[in-house]
């Protein structure tokens, strides 16, 4: 990217950020982020959640933990990115009360109507599965080289987290395409005045968003139901998503809310299916995690800029290379 292009992108980002900050002033919520983040990281590491409950039957390597601890400041970028997108879309997902979408279409342009709680629930369900479709494709596109490696998208940074925990969701610099895919259907029903439906839909979407990075599957029987009886359509995907973060498995399991579209498009990892049907990971998968010392060395290489699989580490410092455009 030339200096002129970089300057142009920077100016546009600064304008959006200024608008977002002026609309959503900084508050104590920002101070809560590092406290909650560090608490989660330390609990998952020192209680050894991954060894006790995780699918890889191995402790989190020290290099992985140290990298995650160093990365806490990326949470502020991710929060800021969501505020920027909320400002652009005219939505407030930070402190909504009776509504998320802050504006409405004029009466003559509204085309969705609800007269009961049942209709609100039906609209919320319809919007949820519309979001599911958009998030699947947004996430899959987010693995294209440009979005994967280029700031402010940089989805590769999120995938530096292999031993995931609930705060892995927010370890992604600024813009996640799936966030845009989430906002569009909620905006559609909210702008039509269906505020209760939009709030229900938001809550429904946040559930799989929060549970997909648990680092273990507390309800394996629900995962089996999802696989055998529901074609992946249940919003319960922690085991699937842990395989999505496994660097030794081909890129797959792109669903962020359900696995329905992965089943439909054939992008479910075969290793996940084996795990569900046999109650444990394949031997060839477990072999990759068997030697903790060797795994630690591999992750050290992964987190070295220019050598690792993801080749993107914001902890290395800000320079012009982070704005380099990658080809698809």
Image: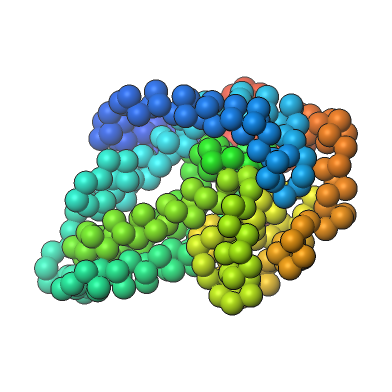
Residue at the (48%, 25%) spot, across then down:
34
Residue at the (37%, 71%) spot, across then down:
126
Can you say which quadrant of the picture contains the C terminus?
Answer: bottom right
In the drawing, does residue 199 fall left or right of residue 156? left
Residue at the (66%, 51%) spot, across then down:
242
In the drawing, does residue 204 fall left or right of residue 48? left
Q: Report x, y in % for residue 98.
A: 19, 51
Q: Report x, y in % for residue 102.
A: 21, 50
Residue at the (21%, 69%) spot, across then down:
117
In the drawing, does residue 154 fall left or right of residue 327? left
Q: Nearer the viewer, residue 324 or 197?
A: 197
Q: Report x, y in % for residue 110.
A: 18, 70
Asked whether residue 161 appears in the rendered view, the answer is no
Q: Nearer the viewer, residue 232 or 127?
A: 232
Residue 92, picture quadrant: top left
Q: Nearer the viewer, residue 141 or 303?
A: 303
Q: Is the residue 58 above or below the residue 205 in the image?
A: above
Residue 249, picture quadrant: bottom right
Residue 307, picture quadrant: top right
Asked whether residue 96 appears in the rendered view, the answer is yes
Q: Report x, y in % for residue 73.
A: 52, 26
Judged from this view, the residue extending furthest toward the left is 107
In the drawing, does residue 176 fall left or right of residue 247? left
Q: How is the image coloured?
A: rainbow
């Amino acid at each position: 990217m030339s200096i002129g292009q970089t300057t142009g992108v920077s100016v546009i980002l600064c304008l959006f950020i200024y608008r977002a900050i002026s609309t959503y002033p900084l508050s104590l919520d920002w101070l809560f982020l590092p406290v909650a983040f560090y608490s989660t990281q330390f609990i998952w590491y020192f209680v050894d959640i991954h060894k006790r409950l995780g699918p890889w039957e191995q402790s989190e390597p020290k290099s992985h933990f140290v990298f995650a601890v160093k990365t806490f400041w990326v949470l502020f970028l991710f929060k800021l990115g969501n505020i920027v997108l909320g400002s652009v879309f005219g939505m407030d997902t930070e402190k909504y009360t009776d509504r998320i979408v802050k504006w409405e279409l004029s009466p003559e342009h509204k085309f969705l109507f609800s007269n009961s709680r049942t209709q609100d629930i039906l609209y919320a369900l319809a919007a949820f599965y519309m979001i599911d479709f958009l998030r699947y494709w947004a996430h899959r596109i987010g693995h294209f080289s440009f979005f994967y490696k280029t700031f402010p998208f940089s989805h590769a940074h999120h995938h530096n987290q292999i031993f995931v925990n609930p705060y892995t969701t927010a370890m992604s610099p600024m813009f996640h395409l799936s966030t845009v895919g989430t906002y569009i259907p909620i905006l559609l029903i909210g702008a039509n005045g269906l505020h209760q439906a939009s709030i229900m839909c938001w809550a429904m979407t946040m559930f799989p968003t929060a549970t997909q990075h648990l680092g273990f599957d507390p309800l394996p029987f629900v995962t089996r139901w999802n696989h055998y009886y529901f074609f992946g359509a249940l919003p319960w995907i922690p085991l699937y998503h842990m395989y999505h973060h496994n660097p030794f498995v081909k890129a797959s399991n792109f669903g962020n809310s359900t696995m329905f579209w992965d089943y439909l498009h054939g992008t479910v990892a075969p290793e996940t299916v084996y795990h569900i049907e046999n109650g444990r990971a394949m031997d060839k998968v477990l072999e990759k995690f068997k030697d903790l010392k060797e795994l630690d060395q591999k992750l050290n290489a992964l987190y070295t800029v220019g050598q690792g699989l993801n080749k993107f580490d914001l902890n290395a410092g800000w320079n012009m290379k982070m704005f380099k455009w990658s080809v698809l």
